[in-house]
Image: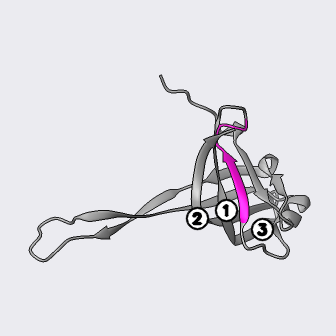
Amino acid sequence: MPTFVHGKSTNFSLDDTGGTIRDISDTLTSVDFPETISTGTTTAFGATSESYIVGIRDASISLSGLWDSTIDGYIIGTEPATRTFIFGPAGNTSGYVKYTGECILTNYSVSSPVGDVVTFSLDLQCTGGVTRTTF
């Protein structure tokens, strides 16, 4: 029987600009982690249906949350070559799944609406493989 978890338990950590891993979960409201696999077409003349071969795996991460000056300091500064991330969709309890790897910051945006709380969004491009293990 499946075991479902609530998103409120999500855990996400990311290197700051100095290379220290920081848990930023308490400011996040959403984590999107799509993984894709490219395909190469092997369709030749005369075929009536497309055919493909498996290509290369890719992953990216999109985060959004409530802006905080401390977290802003972790994100803004001299950009390291890559940053380590740890993502636990079910939390960081022993035995729960976690994804780890290296990523490059590709977008950081702060939104400051007149009638609401200041928020941020952050996009990360994974580089190299993503590892699935447990805490």
Say left or right for 53 vs 135: left
Q: Residue at x 83, y 71 (%)?
A: 76
Q: Is the Cβ of the residue at disc 2 closer than 8 Å to that at disc 1?
A: yes
Choose mark 3 or mark 2, whichever is in front: 2
For the residues labelled 3 and 2, the Cα–Cα distance comes to 28 Å
Question: Horizontal and vertical percent for residue 15?
Answer: 79, 60
Is residue 86 a member of the stretch shown in magenta? yes
Which region shows up in magenta?
A: 83-92
Which residue is identified by label 3? 110
| Residue at the image position 58 percent from the left and 64 percent from the top | 128
**Residue at point 21% right, 66% down?**
50
Mark drawn on residue 128: 2
Estimate the x, y position of residue 11 in percent, counting from the top left: 72, 44
Name the kind of residue labelled 1 in the image.
Answer: Glu
Q: CA distance from mark 2 to mark 1?
A: 7 Å
Of label 1 and label 3, which has the lower sequence position? 1
Magenta span main SS: strand
